[in-house]
Amino acid sequence: MTHTDLLVVGAGPAGLAAAIEAARAGVQALVVDDNLQPGGQIYRQVPLEFSKNASLERKSDFRNGRALISDAIAAGVQFRFGCTAWGLFEAGIMEVVDSSSADRIHAARIVIAAGAHDRPVPVPGWTLPGVFTVGGAQALLKGQRILPGRRMLLAGIGPLLLVVASQLSEAGVDVVGVAEPAPVWAGLTILPALAREWPLLTDGLRYRATLMRNRVPWFSRTVLTRIEGAHAVTAAVVARVDREWRPVSGSEKRFEVDAVAMGYGLLPSIELPRICGCAMEYDALARTWRPVRSRQFESSVPGTFLVGDGAGVAGVIVAIEEGRVAGLAIAEQLGKLRSGEATRRAVPHMKRLATLERFRHAVDRAYALRPGLFELADAETIACRCEEVTFDDLEQAAQDGADTPAMLKSFTRCGMGPCQGRMCAATTAEWLATRTGRNVSTIPLPSAAPPAKPVVTLGALGSD
Amino acid sequence: MPNGPRLPDVDRGCDIAFTCDGEIIRARGGETVAAALLAAGRRTLRNTPRTGEPRGLFCGMGVCFDCVMTVDGQPGLRTCLTSIREGMVVTTF
């Protein structure tokens, strides 16, 4: 058993910011992450074995990430990497495991900053080797400096798609095109909400300029309908879509590629918070479930705070500001700051968050998903990757009476595999909503039980 | 288009050799098993148990479990999160 004042699950920007503020106030903070290094996704670092050179240093994500990591180390934050937090059976005691042993961390306060993962959108052929999420393509590019493919089609919507398309083309991938179902002017609707956050505008323009310079075609009102290949990706097919994102027949265009990256927005990773008992609410605009939180980002479970993309996808600046507010609140709750001090010091962060909330809302509205996206799969398309459950299997189960995700799960095993529904829960809910004519917000979430991620080292659990 | 999938803008770790299903793969220190295999031209990391369909790297961040292989006798390890070591023995699960 390890004792600490504050346990932070997740060493991305939100978790780091929370740990920094708490530690600076005198709170003993321990950060765990199942990755091998801090930074999360946006601040993903190259391995320690790689030596960085000048061109890498110029990349702002590397620089900003290293600065935040340095701040955490300087503040005395402790880290455990390759360490997965998987369950909570008693209040304040988090079960963790790494490659060699299990541990129980007893913490007076917990911050869960587990980040987000790409929303999987099934289309025929989406399980072929060579198909990546845009997050996965970016992780390979940022974290390993290895290209996912030579000739790629990108498909999806939203800010991350633009960023990754730009980064891949700049790195030398022949990006044959980017297929985005929204109209070409969708991004412009965000401009009024930018307020004084000029870097957001200039970043966006810079990415667009990179794509133009590299002659990457941007296909608006276009969706990826099919990926082809016998053993791996050999081609991708796109089609024009109508306002509901339904493909227009006869408009298909085929590209020979060796890799595809798909990115239709992100889903907050709420699995561990749910296991810890945190209440959730449905965000209809973002089309995701997210936790209920106080103004200081405390969840419905007293003492457990949820910050960053893991509590609602809003980007890195929001993640850091939320982390700081939570870290300060925790420091005050633990008596390291005078009563009211946390609120006072949080004022500039709260102001910034209010501005960024308007931006996030505008982004969610501009890039809201339309129904056609959830109708691209055919009967043979895989719905649950882990258990190889097809949409036809789901249909059979529904005809046999399954009308909730839990019933679909018990009839077909959909959601029972090692990813524990991360790749199929949203898909299943959308499918069930469409089939039964219900709003997706009324589809109950599958039950949440430990482990949050599979615990592979069974031997480790035997000790202690 | 740079030469091969490894970008030249970083100095990688030392040369490392490991085996994958008996075949020697040469890679660089710090690289993950999945990335090293991809750079060596091997995209299929496993075949699904029921239908034998090929799967490879998908989410790249440890949530999808499509990249799992047996590493030094330990099955079910996510190769996107596993750093290569000299002499490591990787086999299809």
Image (cartoon, rainbow, N blue to C red):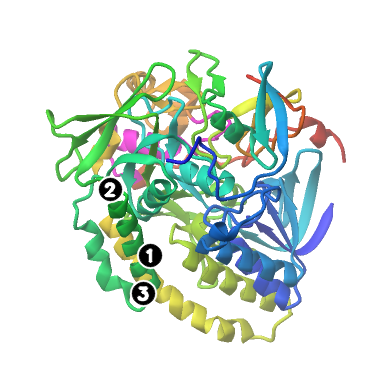
Amino acid type at mark 2: Arg
Q: Earlier in the sequence, mark 3 or mark 1?
A: 3
Secondary structure beneath label 3: helix
Range of the magenta residues? A415-440
Q: Are marks 3 and 1 in contact (CB under 8 Å)?
A: no
Q: Earlier in the sequence, mark 2 or mark 3?
A: 3
Same chain under badges 1 and 2? The reply is yes
* CA distance separating discs 2 and 3: 26 Å
Amino acid type at mark 3: Trp
User: Numbered disc 3: what chain?
Assistant: A
Q: Are marks 1 and 2 in contact (CB under 8 Å)?
A: no
**From what the image shows, is residue A74 above or below residue A170?**
below
Q: Which residue in the structure is indicated by mark 3?
A: A198
Q: Which residue in the structure is indicated by mark 2?
A: A215
A182 displayed left or right of A125:
left
**From what the image shows, is residue A197 above or below residue A102?**
below
